[in-house]
Image (cartoon, helix red, strand yellow):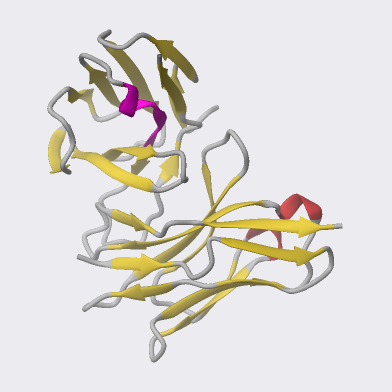
């Protein structure tokens, strides 16, 4: 089975600072990777996905992630944090059949004014 | 139009009761899921259905029984509710493609057992 590990269950950044949320995956086959965001009392919304095309993936709200096979990583970044970015972020990996999504344990992002 | 909709959004019930959560998707997807999110925000897959057939049944108590009357619906029935069942339950859907599609999530059902 595939899995993902998110380092850091809580991350705090100042408004305007760089956001870096870490995700490492384990997979014996090329993975499909996703980042989701969950705002309080809401469902999960897709930020971006990697599907074996470009290794640098751009998503919504200014977020992007880079797939690094040698490091088995798919870290999420945003150059400048905004107060509205405060939320829970989940990294997920999909099996090749696409019928199962394995989620990391989530990272809670706090943005300090 | 809401892509994946769940009802109810909130559910408060007593221990021992039986309750159902309904889920519908209008995306034309052929795979639907139920996830449980605990108080620590951890997301655990419970069930996965493809074209109305059960394909994933993780280790959950048999008090939980999913039912898929058609490809657009996947309901979750829970018998003899226990305090530990309190959580947020998410329905999701995707297409059975070779991993290229993301899962679309409903807004969740917050179940509180008292």
Residue at 38% across / 82% down in the picture?
A72
Task: Locate the N terminus of chain A and report the quarter of the image it occupies.
Answer: bottom left
Image vertical order of residue A75 relative to residue A69, above or below: above
Quarter residue A28 falls in? bottom left
Q: At x 40% / y 14%, what residue is drawn?
A: B114
Q: Is residue A24 left or right of residue A100?
A: right
**Quadrant hosting residue A101:** bottom left
Q: Quadrant of residue B87?
A: top left
Q: Residue furthest right?
A: A113
The magenta stretch spans residue A108: no
Query: Taking A2 as reference, is B88 left or right?
Result: right
Q: Position of residue A104 (x, y in %)?
A: 41, 60
Q: Position of residue A102 (x, y in %)?
A: 32, 57
- Please determine whether, in this image, residue B14 is positioned above or below residue A97: above
Residue displayed at 36% across by 8% down: B14
Q: Main secondary structure of the magenta part?
A: strand
Q: Indicate whether A97 appears above or below B92.
A: below
Give the magenta part as a residue range: B83-92
Q: Nearer the viewer, residue B103 or A88?
A: A88
Tell which of A56 and B84 is nearer to you: B84
Tally of numbered tags: 0
Q: Is residue B110 left or right of residue B33?
A: right
Coordinates of residue A3 in the picture (x, y in percent): 30, 66
């Amino acid at each position: 089975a595939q899995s993902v590990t998110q380092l850091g269950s809580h991350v705090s950044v100042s408004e305007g600072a760089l956001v870096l949320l870490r995700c490492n995956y384990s997979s014996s086959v090329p993975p499909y990777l996703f980042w989701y965001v969950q705002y309080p009392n809401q469902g999960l919304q897709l930020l971006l996905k990697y599907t074996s095309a470009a290794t640098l993936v751009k998503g919504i709200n200014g977020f992007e992630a880079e797939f690094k096979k040698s490091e088995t990583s798919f870290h999420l970044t945003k150059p400048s944090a905004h107060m509205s970015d405060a939320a829970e972020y989940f990294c997920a990996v999909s099996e090749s059949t696409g019928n199962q999504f394995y989620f990391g344990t989530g990272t809670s992002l706090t943005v300090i004014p | 139009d809401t892509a994946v909709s769940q009802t109810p959004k909130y559910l408060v019930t007593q221990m021992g009761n039986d309750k159902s959560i309904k889920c519908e998707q209008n995306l034309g997807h052929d795979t639907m899921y139920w996830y449980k999110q605990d108080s620590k925000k951890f997301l655990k897959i419970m069930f996965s259905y493809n074209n109305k057939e059960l394909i994933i049944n993780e280790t959950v108590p048999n008090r939980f029984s999913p039912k898929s009357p058609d490809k657009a619906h996947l309901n979750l029935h829970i018998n003899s509710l226990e305090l530990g069942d309190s959580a947020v339950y998410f329905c999701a859907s995707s297409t059975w493609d070779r991993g290229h599609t993301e899962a679309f999530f409903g807004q969740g059902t917050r179940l509180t057992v008292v």
